[in-house]
């Protein structure tokens, strides 16, 4: 993947999340986000293909399965549960598998936050299951569940908790994921468009409730080559990119700079992440501009010592070496008087009379054996019958200007005849003698 920012190392992630409690809520894509964070806190390595595909395992990189998974019912239904937790001396990361953004199970999870340890960072997303598995008319229910979830989440968590809503990543046209059971297989080709609409509602509501929104759909719109063949999940490079975005977003929200191992251990944070009191930025070296000085802060135009008329030219600069003296212009000579346009026009040539067109007689048709074939005899003309002129009035010929005597007119006179009648004038292939 062509990354525009440098990936976060293990040392940077470990120092940033030192003594932090991180909670990840969502579907299988958020489970891969949890796994990549757990792996990044221990070593600089990417997730393997088997680690991305496996679900409900008992142990993953020194974490433990708290609830569900292999200890419960392994199914692709909406009743599937999985709770994982990674704990070290200075880090705590927990994952809850959700199939709906607001339900009784989600209320029990929020109750755990109220009664137990309060998280410092919450990364949440739930969209694909809400849109596809419960009701075809999902818009109203999804919006109502989002509002209920955001209201209870804000009432449970403290104000200093960082809540990040991840927008759903782009889906493929042909989806073969485990959640797409045969009963809803017909929704596969159009599900990617429903995700765009659901992301719009979720992003607007999350922003209205004061949550941070990470638009993964926009950020990965040109990285579709890292999407798996099932059209839903993503590879290890994409998830490391997501972890980098989340950690850098958290660092920016807390006002700390990610320590770079190449710069040594003497790097200090910009501000204290607990008190959130920003330190003054380092003073920039003062740049000396040779052309301004005190006149840079004056409203009036400074006068140039090399010219008594003042500083009115872009060619001159204050304090610059004087420009060389210009040669005087040549004396101005008045332009010659122009003759009238009529005198410059050449005289119009006199029109010549057009010669009468010659009527050529077509050659006699040749016989296939070379002998001249006799011309057909001219048939008698049908008597001319005047057509009723009260139905169709003939327009008068156009009036030409008197001086325009050489306009080409129709050379043959056409007689009017009654259409579709036996008196119709015959068309002769050859003119009669």
Image: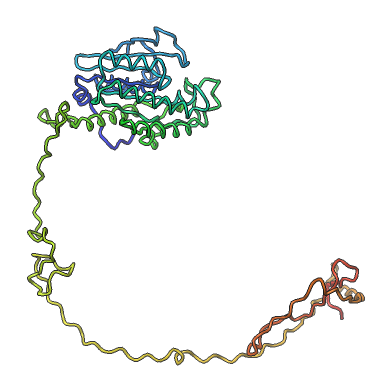
Q: Position of residue 189 (x, y in %)?
A: 52, 31
Colour scheme shown: rainbow
Q: Nearer the viewer, residue 308 or 44?
A: 308
Q: Nearer the viewer, residue 4 or 112?
A: 112
Judge whether 255 appears above or below 426 on screen. above
Q: Position of residue 311 (x, y in %)?
A: 14, 69
Q: Please tell me in which quadrant of the rendered image residue 107 appears.
A: top left
Please tell me which residue is depicted at 49% across the width and 22% down the height of the picture. 133
User: Where does the C terminus fall, quadrant-wise?
Assistant: bottom right
Q: Please tell me in which quadrant of the rendered image residue 67 appears.
A: top left
Please tell me which residue is depicted at 33% across the width and 30% down the height of the picture. 209
Q: Nearer the viewer, residue 224 or 189?
A: 189
Q: Nearer the viewer, residue 176 or 142?
A: 142
Please tell me which residue is depicted at 34% across the width and 28% down the height of the picture. 165
Left or right, residue 291 beside residue 362:
left
Left or right, residue 376 beside residue 397:
right
Please tell me which residue is depicted at 9% across the width and 46% down the height of the picture. 285
């Amino acid at each position: 993947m062509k990354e525009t920012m440098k990936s976060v190392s293990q040392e940077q992630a470990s120092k940033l999340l030192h003594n932090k409690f991180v909670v990840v809520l969502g579907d299988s894509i958020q489970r891969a986000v949890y796994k990549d964070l757990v792996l990044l806190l221990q070593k600089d390595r990417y997730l393997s293909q088997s680690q991305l595909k496996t679900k409900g395992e008992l142990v993953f990189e020194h974490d433990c399965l708290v609830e569900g998974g292999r200890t419960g019912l392994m199914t692709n239904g909406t009743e599937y549960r999985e709770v994982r937790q990674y704990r070290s001396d200075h880090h705590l990361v927990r994952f809850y598998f959700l199939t709906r953004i607001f339900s009784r199970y989600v209320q029990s999870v929020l109750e755990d936050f109220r009664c137990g340890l309060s998280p410092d960072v919450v990364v949440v997303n739930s969209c694909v299951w809400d849109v596809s598995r419960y009701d075809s008319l999902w818009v109203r229910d999804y919006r109502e569940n989002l509002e209920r979830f955001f209201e209870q989440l804000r009432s449970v968590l403290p104000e200093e908790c960082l809540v990040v809503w991840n927008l759903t990543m782009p889906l493929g046209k042909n989806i073969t994921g485990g959640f797409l059971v045969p009963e809803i297989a017909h929704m596969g080709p159009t599900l990617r468009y429903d995700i765009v609409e659901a992301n719009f509602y979720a992003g607007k509501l999350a922003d209205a409730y004061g949550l941070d929104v990470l638009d993964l759909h926009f950020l990965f719109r040109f990285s579709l080559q890292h999407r798996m063949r099932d059209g839903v999940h993503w590879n290890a490079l994409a998830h490391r990119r997501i972890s980098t975005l989340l950690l850098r977003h958290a660092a920016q929200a807390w006002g700390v700079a990610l320590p770079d191992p190449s710069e040594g251990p003497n790097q200090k944070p910009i501000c204290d992440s607990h008190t959130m009191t920003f330190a003054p930025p380092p003073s920039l070296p003062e740049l000396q501009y040779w052309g301004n000085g005190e006149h840079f802060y004056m409203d009036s135009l400074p006068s140039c010592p090399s010219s008594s008329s003042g500083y009115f030219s872009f060619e001159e600069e204050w304090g610059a070496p004087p420009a060389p003296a210009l040669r005087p212009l040549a004396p101005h000579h008045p332009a010659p008087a122009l003759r009238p346009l009529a005198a410059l026009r050449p005289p119009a040539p006199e029109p010549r009379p057009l010669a009468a067109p010659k009527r050529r007689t077509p050659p006699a048709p040749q016989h296939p054996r070379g002998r001249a074939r006799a011309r057909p005899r001219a048939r008698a003309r049908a008597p001319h019958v005047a057509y009723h002129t009260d139905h169709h009035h003939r327009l008068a010929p156009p009036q030409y200007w008197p001086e325009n005597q050489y306009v080409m007119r129709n050379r043959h006179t056409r007689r009017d005849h009654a259409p579709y009648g036996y008196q119709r004038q015959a068309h002769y292939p050859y003119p009669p003698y």
